[in-house]
Amino acid sequence: QLQLVESGGGLVQPGGSLRLSCAASGFTLDYYAIGWFRKAPGKEREGVSCISSSGGYTKYADSVKGRFTISRDNAKNTVYLQMNSLKPEDTAVYYCAAAFRLPVQAMCVMENYNYWGQGTQVTVSS
């Protein structure tokens, strides 16, 4: 059974950091592009950051550029999202998603991702 499991969310003060993990089971991530998306209350789900299957290409939403870093460790079958300088507006449920052999130009388009995790809550508040 193909499964993605997010972890690492929690409550953090503004300016703090968190590292989210997306671990795959039932399949290897080697040929999958991975995206991180988030859904805040009252807002549409949006793309945060995406990485190609090779790790050679990454994309970031303008709102997180310079603060978030996506990376992958295929040996551990895991993708990470390092989030620094967190702001209250980063509060959301964060989801990771996988897409098989996704072209770079199609990255971060939600409809292109086939497998989704259950999400992990990130709350930025003092």
Image: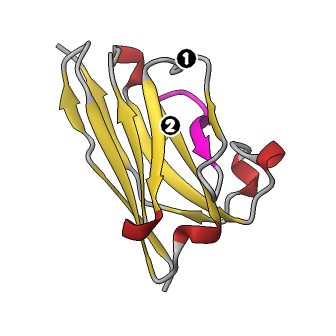
Res 18 → quadrant:
top left
Residue closest to the eye, 16 or 90: 16
Q: What is the x, y in percent for residue 95?
A: 47, 49
User: Which label belongs to residue 39?
Assistant: 2
Residue closest to the eye, 66 or 118: 66
Q: Is residue 46 magenta?
A: yes
In the displayed structure, 108 sits above or below 3; it is above
In the displayed structure, 124 sits above or below 94; it is above
Q: What is the x, y in percent for residue 118?
A: 42, 59
Q: How far separated are the C-alphas under marks 2 and 1?
A: 14 Å
Res 48 → quadrant:
top right
Q: Residues within 10 Å of mark 2 (few under 14, many from 20)?
A: some
Residue closest to the eye, 36 or 126: 36
Which residue is located at x 28 percent, y 29 percent? 123
Residue closest to the eye, 78 or 88: 78
Give the residue type at disc 2: Lys
Q: How many marks?
A: 2
Range of the magenta residues? Answer: 41-51
Which residue is located at x 41 percent, y 69 percent? 75
Q: Which image quarter holds the C terminus? A: top left
Q: Secondary structure at mark 1?
A: loop
Which residue is located at x 76 percent, y 59 percent? 102
Q: What is the x, y in percent for residue 13?
A: 19, 18
Kindly identify which residue carries mark 1.
Answer: 63
Give the residue type at disc 1: Ser
Looking at the image, is mark 2 or mark 1 earlier in the sequence?
2
Q: Secondary structure at mark 2?
A: strand
Image position of 64 (left or right of 7) = right
Q: Give the foreground label among 2 and 1.
A: 1
In the displayed structure, 43 sits above or below 100; it is above
Q: Is residue 38 magenta?
A: no
Q: What is the x, y in percent for residue 49?
A: 57, 37
